[in-house]
Amino acid sequence: MIQADPDTRWILLRTKRKAFQVMLGCLILLGTGCVMEPKIAPIPSLQQILTRKYIMTWETPSNVPTTCPTEDSKSALAQARMARLFCSPTASAYYRDALTYSLYALNSPASCSACAHEPSTLIKLHNESLEGLLLATGFGIGQDARLATKKLEKLGFQISCSDGFMNEFEPDELWPANGFMTIEVKDPAREKGLGLPLIVYRKPRPRDGIVPEMFFPPHWKFAATAVARLVKSDDGQGVVPVIELIDPLETDHVRVGDLKIPLAKDFTTPVISLLSHSGYRNKAIQGLMWPSSLTNEEGVTLVHPYRPGRIPLVLIHGLGCSPRIMADIANSVHADPVLRQRYQVMIVYYTTGDTILQDAAVIRRAFHSMRSHYDPSHTDTAWDNTVVLGHSLGGPIARLLTSHSDQKIEQTLFTRSWDELVMRETIRQASEPAIFFEPVSEINRVIYLTATMRGSRIADQVEARALSAVLPRRKLLELFHTEIIENNGIDAFQPEYRNRVPSSIDNQSPESPILAVTNNLRLKDGLNSHSIQANLTPMLPRQLSTDGLVPFKSSLIDEAVSQVVLPVQDHFCTHDRRTLNEIARILNENRAE
């Protein structure tokens, strides 16, 4: 057998290492490292029909409740199913009757005591009749909720919203959540009870600087639960049926008649649909390759309608990625009964082709705008315990949000003081927040998740350098760069920035001056930092290990009050059970303090 000489073996090892780094570099630069997020899929309607246990009784329901409204409800429900199966227009009327009878049975369970009907039977009849009525009147994917509401009103049912749950807007579509199945979800957060869990869908609107549109995701989907009730009529002489949309993050039980019944909930399907099926995958690549095309979608947005008294948890994604990588984290917070009562999840989207200074300025401005809108008097102390989680490139951005600039950014970029530079006032005002800033006072705690604090050599590889060279910069940054050179000369910039504005890929190089100064900025007093690192090479000494993209020594947070290392895990560990458990521990610690 031919033995390779030591030099040849060394060359082969270096070649393999280089090929491995190129492959990993392509993964992060093309955003394919973020494909492990959970997903949902529609359940075929035929499958829904075949998997349900129908009670096919054929008694014709009367128009008034009989001595046993439960039996009337069963009869009407059976006829409604058959009518719907054959696309008969009478299906909605039968569902209406079935739901009305079930409401009478729930409000007067004593009338059914002779038949020994359990509350679970009444709840099931209510839920199935309500679902059938909503679908038969036109609620669902692609169906205008306003038109369906009018059809529902003709059948005698009004739709209302509890406690100003959606007082800032009107939903465009309502989708029954049980029409979808979830895939690769760590903590499916669903609870049985009274009501029909819904996905409330709101189509994109113009949102560039428009309040409160700028705080809503472009394709917003969130959880609600529909419950039918009998309420007193306006004249007080009788009762009328209404369908109420209830916030499942606020309400655990509903009272119907003398019964206190748990509310049915599905937190998982809406949040997975929002983060994994709202175009964020394409926006991840588009935001990296053409950052100017998505500037109107940048900022901090709500996952669920705003709730006063809840601590903001702000999730910042990394390079070439998007909020979709945070789906498991958002879902795990909603799955925890304690955390969902104390926190409200906010997601950040930013175009990752820009410099991290500009990204941090965008997020800082958006966060301040959100608090000014929802808490203008700054009396809600929950805001002052804000937790920020930064994954990958989100780590250095989180550091910028919690640091004092102290003229260090100015000195890193320019050879002269900021006041000496000549430029138009509009350019100065637009650029200044990225160079001079104070910590966001509301942020009390930062979680660094496989953060690229000291960069990665992958950013120095040939393919990364080539991509950075051709990436277009944000128009404002290009204009700023040109303005400084034309009015002050090219030597006004430090040598590293004389040819072109740096990209986020440049900011991820271990040799990046911006990344170096970010790590040396003065932090906010009293800030609590936590570190979660991944170790894909546990066979190596820890200081030499890596998560596949970022070396251990790069993601190490010196000032962290807690550090967790995940063995045999890669850089994209937002879905890992150990990651979710550690985040929950930190959030509970923040809540207790």
Image (spheres, rainbow, N blue to C red):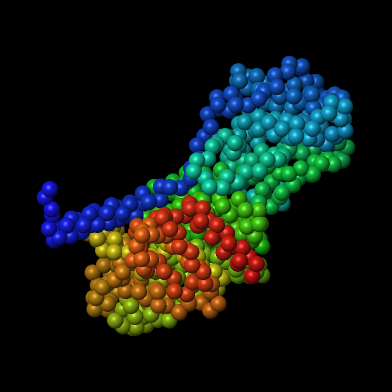
**How many marks are shown on the rendered structure?**
0
Compared across the picture, whether 66 is left or right of 142 comes to right
Q: Position of residue 54 (x, y in %)?
A: 67, 23
Q: Position of residue 268 (x, y in %)?
A: 57, 45
- State the image quarter where residue 243 is shown: top right
> Residue at (66%, 62%) from the top-left corner?
309
- State the image quarter where residue 231 is shown: top right
Q: Position of residue 183 (x, y in %)?
A: 50, 40
Q: Camera-side residue: 211 or 105?
A: 105
Decide: is 183 above or below 503: above
> Residue at (59%, 39%) from the top-left corner?
177
Q: Camera-side residue: 186 or 460?
A: 186
Decide: is 133 above or below 346: above
> Residue at (28%, 52%) from the top-left corner?
23
Image quarter (top left, top right, bottom left or bottom right) of the C terminus: bottom right
- State the image quarter where residue 338 is shown: bottom right
> Residue at (66%, 48%) from the top-left corner?
248
Compared across the picture, whether 268 is left or right of 33 comes to right
Q: Position of residue 214 (x, y in %)?
A: 52, 57
Q: Camera-side residue: 552 or 347?
A: 552
